[in-house]
Amino acid sequence: MRKTKNYFALPFNPELKQRARKLRQAGNLSEVLLWNQIKKKQLLGLDFDRQKIIGNYIVDFYCAELKVALEIDGESHINKAEYDARRDAYLKSLGLTVIHVTDEDVKRNLAGVMVWLEGHVALKK
């Protein structure tokens, strides 16, 4: 059972459940690399979910305790600036913080990304 009410308080589109499951199973390299660093409360003892459905969107990672959505921006985000802006505005309207990390940064400098994330999320704690 989740320890936070923030987890179940968010809007949820059940029609996206299968898509979120497929995204988790497919797992692109940068998502898998980052997930291996944050799963099982490895990042400051925080619980993250992978491919979390929020409304009509699926975010890469979500921490209910801090109300933070973490997105890895890679090739799938090319030519989707308008969509990403709409999604970010929606998430922010729910009181969430959206953090973007580039796919290349995760692949080339995972240690640096982790230090940056620790500093960024520590401010929210």
Image (cartoon, rainbow, N blue to C red):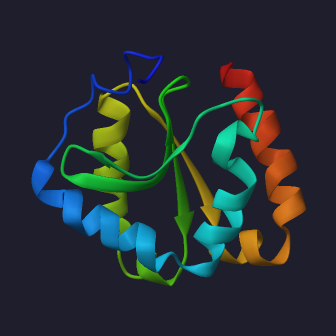
Q: Nearer the viewer, residue 87 or 61?
A: 61
Quadrant in which the N terminus appears: top left
Residue displayed at 69% across by 48% down? 38
- To which quarter of the image does residue 20 belong? bottom left
Q: Is residue 98 above or below residue 26?
A: above
The residue positioned 63% from the left and 79% from the top of the image is 29
Task: Decide if residue 112 is on the left or right side of residue 23.
Answer: right
* Percent coordinates x, y for residue 8 in the rendering: 29, 26
Residue extending furthest toward the front: 1
Tell me what residue is drawn at x 89 percent, y 60 percent. Answer: 111
The C terminus is located in which quarter?
A: top right
Horizontal and vertical percent position of residue 94:
31, 28
- Count the labels in the image: 0
Residue that appears at 30% across and 30% down: 93
Residue 56 x/y as whole percent: 18, 51
Residue 90 sits in which quadrant?
A: top left
Above/below status of 9 relative to 108: above
Residue 27 pos. (x, y %): 50, 75
Q: Is residue 100 above or below residue 25?
A: above
Left or right: residue 93 versus residue 63 is: left
Q: Is residue 34 left or right of residue 65?
A: right
- Between residue 93 and residue 111, name the one nearer to us: 111
Residue closest to the eye, 2 or 109: 2
Work out whether 124 lies above or below 54. Answer: above
